[in-house]
Amino acid sequence: MEHKAKSKKRYLTLFIMALGASAIYFLPFIRWTYYDSLKQALELNNTQFGTLLSAYGIAAMIFYFPGGWLADRVSARRLLTFAFASTGILGFYFSTYPSFNMLLIVHFIWGIISTLTFWSAMIKATRDLANSDEQGRFFGLLEGGRGLLQTVITMSALAVFTSLGAGVIGLTRVIIIFSFVNVFAAILTWFVLEDTKFSQEQKPVLLDALSVLKMPVVWLIAVIVITCYSTYLGTTYLTPYVTQVLGATAAMSALIAIIRNYGLQFFGGPFGGLVADKKGSSAQIVMYCFAIMLICMVFFLMLPASNSLIIVLLLNMLVMGLAIFMMRGIYFATLDEVGIPSNLTGSVVGIVSLIGFTPDVFFNPVAGHFLDVYPGVAGYKYIFILMTGFVTVGLVASIVLLNLINKSKSVKGHNQVEARG
């Protein structure tokens, strides 16, 4: 009975973290759903509007490693509660549509919150929640849960927005709804999650950083994340590709984008986790996913951009998207497999994330340059070549990582046999 209660508590905790992980990004990235309405409500031009997300991105990049260091020293319960509550409170202020300078400050603070007090704390809490043979499943369920909850909440908010005339009043209600969801996640986090116990001996931040940077596996995981994330960003250009090049309707393109961004995340994350746990190796599934992605990219490069092949190309896109979300659901599960000490989880996640999510800075400008300089099919082909390069590097990194893991297991097994003898 006690075991069942503990198991239910773990899954409830995972659900709350998935809810918070969905909610915390609603407000900074609300523009992707309500771009024109929000720009009009804030009375900003396109340059100012873009600068807000730049402020968010700069703050997020700066605080990835400090956030990892903090996650190894402060309870996830406290960090996540603060992250969700403060994001929601700022959201209520955001709903008043303040001045441009204040909007910059709000987005900068959101960037700090998302990486200093949220990201690494969530990854560490998920790792601590699962046993070694459950890492893939729990990380996969976290990713899938985010996809499901994002779909339900954003579609519900969209219904409210539409019912109120799809104007400023409706947008204000949507912002308030997203803010309430964050505060609700904070309350659940405080009352359900348990405080983490830490070792009394804590190394200074510089020693933690040096310890992490000396680990080859950390660099390999960082390469896996940066190549997977770059490829994921590349898939966002498949939406205009199917309309501008393949001739699909805007409605069909929107449906494809929803399936790719939410449906595949909901299914791919848990599926990847279950397969990884069944195989007993998240690194092995990561390698298989890269191999599938490489085959898909070869199809994109080799097949002619013809409307008659649109079904084949769309199926290829869905297979690739599934492989990406399977990998996104489990690449942090490799931390346990490579033997990263639990007390360094936050620091490792901070370093890996700092490197792994840099495509937010460079990928879109590069892809945009290709489309401007090489209009039409040619521009997209260059994006596909870039994506293929990232996938190839990721595949090599995953093979090297898997070999290191297998060698480590072989050495341990040999030592155990000698010890018994």
Image: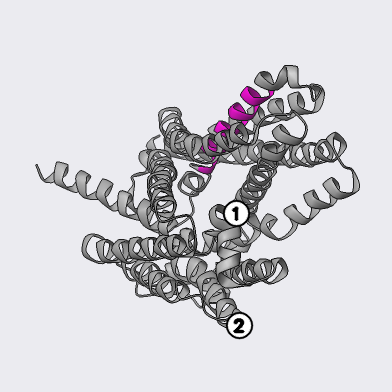
Look at the numbered disc 1 and give the secondary structure of its residue: helix
Regarding residue 344, the answer to whether it shows in the image is no
Mark 1, Cα crowd under 10 Å, few <14 / some 14-19 / many 20+, is: many
Q: Who is closer to the viewer here, 298 or 89?
A: 89
For the record, the magenta segment spans 313-328
Above or below — where is 335 with respect to 65?
above
* Mark 1 or mark 2, whichever is nearer to me: 2
| Three-letter amino acid code at the position of disc 1 | Val
- Residue 229's x, y, as percent? 63, 47
Look at the numbered disc 2 and give the secondary structure of its residue: helix
Q: Name which residue lies at 59% across and 77% down.
A: 104
Above or below — where is 421 with respect to 152?
above
**Quarter location, residue 23:** bottom left
Label ID, residue 101: 2
Regarding residue 273, the answer to whether it shows in the image is yes
Above or below — where is 101 with respect to 391?
below
Q: Who is closer to the viewer here, 203 or 146?
A: 146
Q: Name which residue lies at 71% across and 40% down.
A: 240
Asked whether 321 falls inside the magenta stretch, the response is: yes
> Total number of numbered labels?
2
Q: Name which residue lies at 44% across and 31% down.
A: 271
- The quarter of the picture where the C terminus appears is top left
Q: Which residue in the protein does label 1 denote?
A: 218
Q: Who is closer to the viewer here, 114 or 221?
A: 114
- Residue 304's x, y, as percent? 81, 22
- The quarter of the picture where the N terminus appears is top left
- Residue 188's x, y, as percent? 25, 61
Task: State whether the magenta stretch is mostly helix, strand or loop.
Answer: helix
